[in-house]
Image: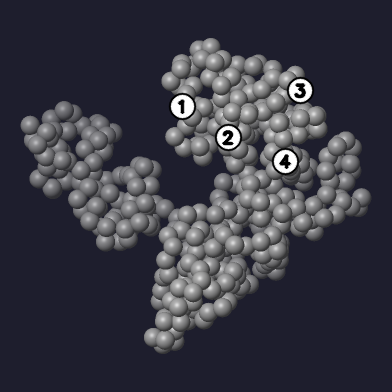
Amino acid sequence: MAISEQDIPRLRQIINVALRNGAGVQEIVNKLKDALEGVYRPRGYGASDLDIATLVFRLGGRQLLFALNQSLGLPSIRTLHTRSTFTVITPTIGPIQNEQLDENIRSVVLSSRTCITALRGVSLMVDEIALEEMAVHFSKYNKIAGLCWKHSHLVDPVLHTYESAITIAQKIHDGEVHLGKELTVIGAACFGEDELYPILAAPTCKTENAGDMEIMLTRTIERWNITGAAASVGPVWSFVTDGDATRRAAGHKLFLKKPLSPESQLYSILNNMPGLNTMTGDAEVTLDFDFKHIFKRFCTLIRSPAGIVLNNGRVINAMMLSRYLVWLPAYDEASVTKLLHPDDPQDVPRAIELMQAIVDFSKSHNVIKSILIPFINPKLSPPEQVHYLSCYAHLAFTIFRIHRRAFMPFQLYYDTQTCIKNVIFNIAM
């Protein structure tokens, strides 16, 4: 009755701890009574507890986390600092400067890898994350942050006087300077490791052009080399983005501007692969596209009424799939509807599930199978991965040459072929 009338914080945790300690029924009941009276709180937190506490801390701050720690038994801020890794990054206030990139590379990357001596290939990844549109005062610098990096050179972000704040507000009101709509983030990832190191966080008003992106990407690679990260962590092999048109144009100009040199160590490996695009950027850096974004766009195309047209004239679209996927033992009409009309079109697992279902049904649908399997089957060897991806590249080229946009948009074709090329380059490295 006491349990039904009162809320015991972390009831499941109390029972689990008691069972792990070999407690009997009566001892567990006594622990529950102690918890009801507030004289016992179980120790030990799982990953979900830490995730919830981190979310509370990020959204509500220390005071909210303290309140929920006392009332619901969430991990305290001290526990979070002990059990979790907090990355402190210098935000971009004003235009993107070398000093900001240098500070983040040294504090976020180099300082955390002092015990790691093996060099790795590095992939720089760029994307946007949601950002609340508001100006924020950074007391550490006495500056106003949250202004778009492209136009913030038009105003002094330092609060010298009250008039400084009035000037900034007026510039925002007049549209000369904008509040950041999103945050452009660039992170460094080492091949063979799971860690991602953020090295740039810059508010964006989404008005940048390809020239602005070229400057940003070039500067990031330059600072990576100048700070010594290339020598102590590893050289940049690729630059990864999503399907953003501005970054695609910038990446194409930067990383597909000259053929692979015959003097390169990669030349003897890749020169005998007919059809492979061997254009690279400086230092043999290649352009790449996030396969998760590619899968989402693939499924958006498949789910559309037009679908994709294959060489045999057949069309794969939502109407056709809704008729035939129900034949698979694992699916009924309701589950197929969820696959074809998901609540969240950005749901990557659902996109992969749809592609896998098409492969399972068709048995011989090599176009989708060839691009899907190398990314979801970790047991494949590098030669097997290249075999699948090469199969996709040649099939896609053949179908695209005949059907063009009826098969897929030019941008998606470019992104998939570029992604495959980058994988082959990275394996050859």
Q: Which of marks 1 and 4 is nearer the N terminus?
A: 1
Asked if the residue at tag 2 contacts the one at tag 1, i.e. Cβ–Cβ closer than 8 Å, the answer is no
30 with respect to 198 (left or right): left
The amino acid type found where label 1 is placed reads Lys
The amino acid type found where label 2 is placed reads Thr
Label 1 sits on a secondary structure element that is: helix
Identify the residue at the far left of this view.
1
Which residue corresponds to the image point at 72% horizontal and 41% vertical from the top-left? Answer: 410
Q: Name the residue under label 1.
A: 338
Which residue corresponds to the image point at 70% horizontal and 43% vertical from the top-left? Answer: 411
Vertical comparison of 378 with 88: above or below: above
Residue 149 is at least partly visible in this image? yes
Circle 1 Cα neighbour tier, 10 Å, few/some/many (<14 / 14–19 / ≥20)? few
The span from disc 1 to disc 4 (Cα, nearest Å) is 28 Å
Q: Mark 2 points at which residue?
A: 300
Identify the residue at the far right of this view.
262
Circle 2 Cα neighbour tier, 10 Å, few/some/many (<14 / 14–19 / ≥20)? some
Q: Say which mark, if any, is on residue 410.
A: 4
The span from disc 3 to disc 1 (Cα, nearest Å) is 28 Å
Label 4 sits on a secondary structure element that is: helix
Q: Say which mark, if any, is on residue 311.
A: 3
